[in-house]
Image (tube, helix red, strand yellow):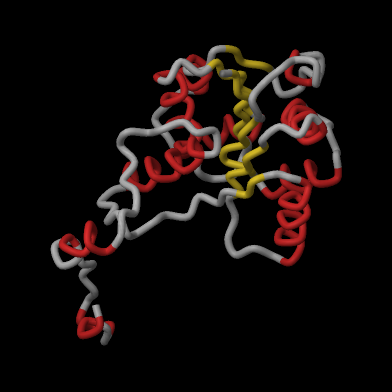
Amino acid sequence: MRLVVAMTGATGAIIGIRLLAVLRELSVETHLVVSRWARATIAEETAYTVREVIGLASVSHAPEDLSAPISSGSFRTEGMIVVPCSMKTVAGIRIGYADNLVGRAADVTLKERRPLVLVARETPLSTIHLENLLDLSRMGATVLPPVPAFYNHPSSVTDVVEHIVGRALDQWGLALPTLRRWEGPRKHGHARERHAVAVPAEDGLAARA
C-alpha cells in the first residue's frame, strides 16, 4: 500500500507524527509533504525535529516541488491524508488552488476518485469553514476532525492521539491494535465509576459528576 501524507500548520502535529510511525510499522509506503508552517508547528508543539519526522516516511517531498511524482494522477496511490489540516489548506483544496504540493496532491487525489482524508483542526468553526468542509465532503473527501472520544476513558494526550490515529487508519481498513473501540455499555459500563472525572466542588457541579 502507498499513501500520501501531508502535514500543514494547524495545531496537532503529534497526530501526524504518530500516524507516520504506525504506517511505518505496518509497512505502508508513505510519501510525506511537510509544509513550511507545519515545520514551525512541529518545533513548537513536539520534541521531534523536522529531520526525525521526515525520517519516519518512506519518501519525502519539498512542499514547493510540483514536479514530484505525487503531483500526477499516473502515479498510483491508495489515497491521501492531510494531518493536521489547516483551514487555509481546506479552502485551497476546495477551490482547486494548487499552488503547492499539498494542494496539488490533494487535487489529484480528488480527480482520481481516491480516498482523501482531512484531519481538519480548528475551533470554533466559522460559516466559511463549515461550507468549505461540506463542499469537500460532497466532492468525496472524508472530514475527520481530531475530536477525542471519552467512552474509552483516555488518561493522557497519548490516549487521545492514539484514538484519532486509529480512526484515521480505519479509512483504509488498517488496524491499530492499541485502539480501544466501543463495544457497548456492557463492556464499558464497569469502568465508568473508576474513571469518573472529578469536578471541583466550588463549580457547583460535583453532585452531577
Q: Tell me where residue 163 appears, x and y as whole percent.
A: 39, 45
Q: Quadrant of residue 78?
A: top right
Q: Is residue 55 above or below residue 148?
A: above
**Figure quadrant of residue 72:** top right
**Foreground residue, 37 or 75?**
75
Q: Is residue 4 left or right of residue 167?
A: right
Q: Is residue 21 above or below residue 128?
A: above
Instruction: Name the residue rendered at 50%, 17% in the picture.
Output: 51
Vertical placement of 58 versus 138: above or below? above
> Going by the image, does 189 lie left or right of 147?
left
**Quadrant in the picture for the C terminus:** bottom left
Give the image location of residue 38, x and y in percent.
60, 34
- Residue 58 location, x and y as percent? 54, 12
| Quadrant of the frame with the N terminus | top right
For the point 30% across and 60% down, the residue is 184
Identify the residue at horizontal 27%, vertical 83% (top origin): 205
Q: Locate residue 152, reporting x and y percent.
A: 30, 54
Give the number of callouts: 0
67, 10: nearer the viewer: 67
- Quarter-wise, where is residue 47 in the image? top left
- Vertically, is 60 above or below 205? above
Q: Residue at x 65, y 29 (%)?
A: 79
Q: Nearer the viewer, residue 117 or 132?
A: 117
